[in-house]
Amino acid sequence: MDSEFQFELGVCQWAEQFWPPERRRTKPVIVARQLGTKRRRWDTLVIECNAEGLRQRANFGTKRLDSNLLHVVRNAPASYEWYRDALPEPSYPWRYVRDAVHQAADRGLIKRRRGHGGRIELKRKWTYPEWVERIVAIENKPDLDASAARDLATQLERDIALSLADEVWVATATTDDSVEPVLLTERPQEAGIMTIDSGIRGKDSAAVVWHPSTLDVSAPGTRILEQPTGGKYDASACRFEYVSPAWKATKRLEIAERAYERGWRSYLSSMRPDCRYFELRPEPDVPRPYCSAKACYQTARECAGSCAAFEPEPPMWRQHGWPITGGPGNGIKRLLSEQRERQRPK
Ligand code: SF4
């Protein structure tokens, strides 16, 4: 494959169709890319869902619920109550809760009315379901030399110490050679390794080299802030802090909500499909961005406002006669959005 970005799209597409590796799928999955926390963003995330919970989640629409909305929706009572009586004391001012109540009502997520003395009252329309069962984080590294594998090992140690995801994997490209030995020896044993074929023809395109351990997401996590390099003269101490199980549970749900909204095809939002050279090439399997000016599968970083070769799509493409309403830029966006809707498990 031409780049890490292309590899990443391939991994996402494989996961959407075939996750989990070497086992039969028993539950729906949602795949997203480039999601995580403020400090850590994973290349690919697989959210394994409870089928019934996921069906009920659809009641709340396709847009994500952020932490404020989740606070309201998850605690909304069965019958009308003043929001300050109904909702748990927040760790931030009540006025933000009130704003979230209005926002939730405006989005049709709860019912709201003015009660006695003009107080804002709310009640739920639906119970917010337990729809997230497991979160799997995958780091995509198609080409891994010894030094990159060492850097990655440090990153994986942090992921495992925090245990925000149930499983942590490294996906690397299938080659004639075996997996980079440093990856096998220096990475924490809890992290899994899989190889993925660039062709992505079927479930067998991915092979497990090392099975991961299931991490304890309900236990307190350790956030490593600073890690000694371990060199001969490095006497520095490791700095870390604990994170509570409650923080992890909230963060996991927020991540899952973002994955639910975005999926993995949202990469167009950071690229230039309105450029006349932008194409989506379906081969070999997943539509991938292709730049006809540079004759390559471009990365999201290249295909940005700063690209010197950018040329706007001709106005004619936006008018009558063009087979895709609104021009190819809009047509491509619509195509990916439709694909996302089709693939969103119900
Ligand atoms: S020319 Fe630049 S902006 Fe246009 S498609 Fe190619 S990389 Fe993207």
Image: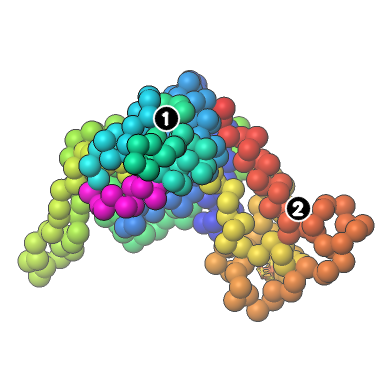
Residue 275 visible in the snapshot = yes
Where on the picture, by quarter, is residue 307?
bottom right
On the rendering, which quadrant does ligand 1 occupy?
Answer: bottom right
Principal secondary structure, stretch drawn in magenta: helix
Label 2 lies in ligand 1 vicinity (Cβ under 8 Å) = no
- Location of residue 329 by image quarter: bottom right
Q: Amino acid at mark 1?
A: Arg
Q: Secondary structure at mark 2?
A: helix
User: Mark 1 or mark 2: which comes first in sequence?
Assistant: 1
The reply to whether discs 1 and 2 touch (Cβ–Cβ < 8 Å) is no
The part of the chain drawn in magenta is 91-100
In the rendered image, which residue does mark 1 sit on? 124
Seen at 63% across and 38% down, the residue is 341
Q: Is residue 132 above or below residue 177?
A: above
Residue visible at 88% across and 57% down in the picture: 322
98 in the magenta segment? yes
Q: CA distance from mark 1 to mark 2?
A: 38 Å
Magenta highlight on residue 97: yes
Residue 235, relative to residue 95: is it above or below? below
Residue for badge 2: 331
Q: Position of residue 214 (x, y in %)?
A: 29, 32
Can you give x and y, in whole percent of width and height, for residue 155 in the image?
Answer: 30, 54
Amino acid type of the residue tagged 2 in the rendering: Gly
* 203 vs 244, nearest the viewer: 244
Q: Position of residue 260 (x, y in %)?
A: 50, 40
Name the residue located 83 percent from the left edge and 69 percent from the top edge.
315
